[in-house]
């Protein structure tokens, strides 16, 4: 965290986006990609990451989903302190961030394997209407 803080202070990153919606989407993409890389490399940025990893191991809840829900709970209380409009922009940021995080960690295609002794029965509906 110290190196990150020093890097930000030294670089002075500025992005000329003045629309709050575009800023929320762009920040969500950057944050989600960064968080996804950290989690995919078995690291953690602290905070909700640690609790989300625990929920993944115990209940198989996807990382992005648990981060969105946990931060959404905090955001609900923050909406009373700050404006509802700012809370909604933050919710957009969180949603985009967690979706990008899931793509980075899990990939675009979700494949699964079904193992069964009844291959003919399962294969009957392929290309046709399902046989119920």
Image: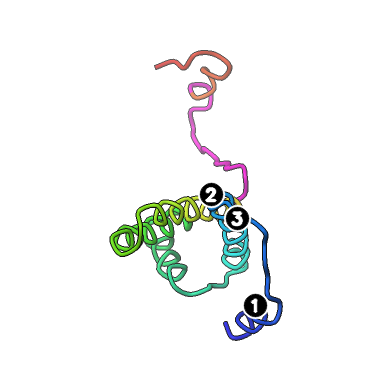
Q: Earlier in the sequence, mark 1 or mark 2?
A: 1
Single out the mark in the foreground, 2 or 3. Answer: 3
- Disc assigned to residue 23: none
Is 75 situated left or right of 103 in this image?
left
Q: Secondary structure at mark 3?
A: loop
Q: Earlier in the sequence, mark 1 or mark 3?
A: 1
Q: Tell me which corner region of the image, top left, top right, bottom left or bottom right, holds residue 90.
A: bottom left
Is 75 situated left or right of 121 in this image?
left
Taking 112 as reference, is 33 above or below it? below
Question: Quick one: label 2, few (<14), some, or many (20+) residues within 10 Å?
Answer: some
Residue 20 within the magenta-colored segment of the rendering: no
- Residue 102: image x %, image y %? 55, 53
Pointer 1 and pointer 2: residues touching (CB < 8 Å)? no
Residue that numbered label 1 is attached to: 8
Q: Secondary structure at mark 2?
A: helix
Single out the mark in the foreground, 1 or 3. Answer: 3
Q: Residue furthest front?
A: 18
Residue that numbered label 2 is attached to: 21
Overall secondary structure of the magenta stretch?
loop
Residue name at image x 35 percent, y 53 percent = 84
Q: Secondary structure at mark 1?
A: helix
Residue 118 within the magenta-colored segment of the rendering: yes
Q: Quadrant of the C terminus?
A: top left
Query: Where are the magenta residues, as a range?
Result: 104-121
Pointer 2 and pointer 3: residues touching (CB < 8 Å)? no
- Disc assigned to residue 18: 3
């Amino acid at each position: 965290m110290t190196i990150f803080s020093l890097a930000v202070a030294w670089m002075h990153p500025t992005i000329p986006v003045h629309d709050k919606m575009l800023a929320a989407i762009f920040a969500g993409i950057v944050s989600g990609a960064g968080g996804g890389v950290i989690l995919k490399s078995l690291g953690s940025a602290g905070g909700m990451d640690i609790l989300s990893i625990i929920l993944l191991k115990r209940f198989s809840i996807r990382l992005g989903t648990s981060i969105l829900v946990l931060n959404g709970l905090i955001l609900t209380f923050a909406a009373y302190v700050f404006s509802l409009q700012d809370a909604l922009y933050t919710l957009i940021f969180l949603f985009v961030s967690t979706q990008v995080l899931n793509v980075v960690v899990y990939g675009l295609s979700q494949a699964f394997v079904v193992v069964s002794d009844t291959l003919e029965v399962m294969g009957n509906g392929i290309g046709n209407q399902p046989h119920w």
